[in-house]
Image: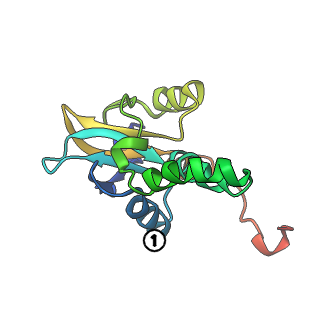
Amino acid sequence: MNVKDVMTRNPITIDPEAPLATAMAVMKKNAIRHLLVTDDAGRLFGIITDRDLRSAAFAPALIEHLSGIAQRHAHGIGQALEELRVRDAMTWDVVTTHSEVSLGHAARVLFFGRFGSLPVVDGTKLVGILTERDLLRAVSILMPDPPVDVEGFLW
């Protein structure tokens, strides 16, 4: 089985100049954790993850715990954070794969690289994304077990 057999095709993307708040809204609306950053021609520039967004949003939260003087000094930093764009928080040097790679190879790259996803490219053009969820779906299809009573689990 190859990456092309399980990857998410036509992934949701965002422009590097989009505000971070827009990236956060897109990820929340679509229930995704990895948002690929592309130009209008579909070339991959990078990736922004929910972890990147949390890191960028965490700094303003710290300001409320500072002394009054420190808060005034940090106020300018907080305003600058509100003006951040996707390009300011994304990972530029993203590891990619292509669609003909075996699923086992891609899984090893994800595991040993400690990545949650791999953008799938054909040359310089983005064609999909392979996520941990895609891999788990493939495993559940390839290794079916008896039906599971989800109601029996304690959440």
- Mark 1 sits on what residue? 29
Residue 154 falls left or right of residue 76: right
Residue 25 falls left or right of residue 67: left
Q: Residue at x 57, y 47 (%)?
A: 73
Q: Quadrant of the C terminus?
A: bottom right
x and y percentages locating residue 106 in the rendered image: 46, 31
Q: Amino acid at mark 1?
A: Lys
Indicate the secondary structure of the residue bearing disc 1. Answer: helix
Residue 29 falls left or right of residue 16: right
Image quarter of residue 47? top left
Q: Is residue 24 above or below residue 6?
A: below
Number of numbered discs: 1
Residue extending farthest left: 41
Foreground pick, 108 / 1: 108
Foreground pick, 68 / 118: 68
Q: Residue at x 69, y 58 (%)?
A: 64
x and y percentages locating residue 79 in the rendered image: 46, 56
x and y percentages locating residue 86 in the rendered image: 36, 49
Foreground pick, 58 / 139: 58
Q: How is the image coloured?
A: rainbow
Foreground pick, 34 / 74: 74
x and y percentages locating residue 32 in the rendered image: 49, 59
Residue 88 falls left or right of residue 49: left
Q: Residue at x 34, y 38 (%)?
A: 46
Image quarter of residue 93? top left
Q: Quadrant of the N terminus?
A: top left
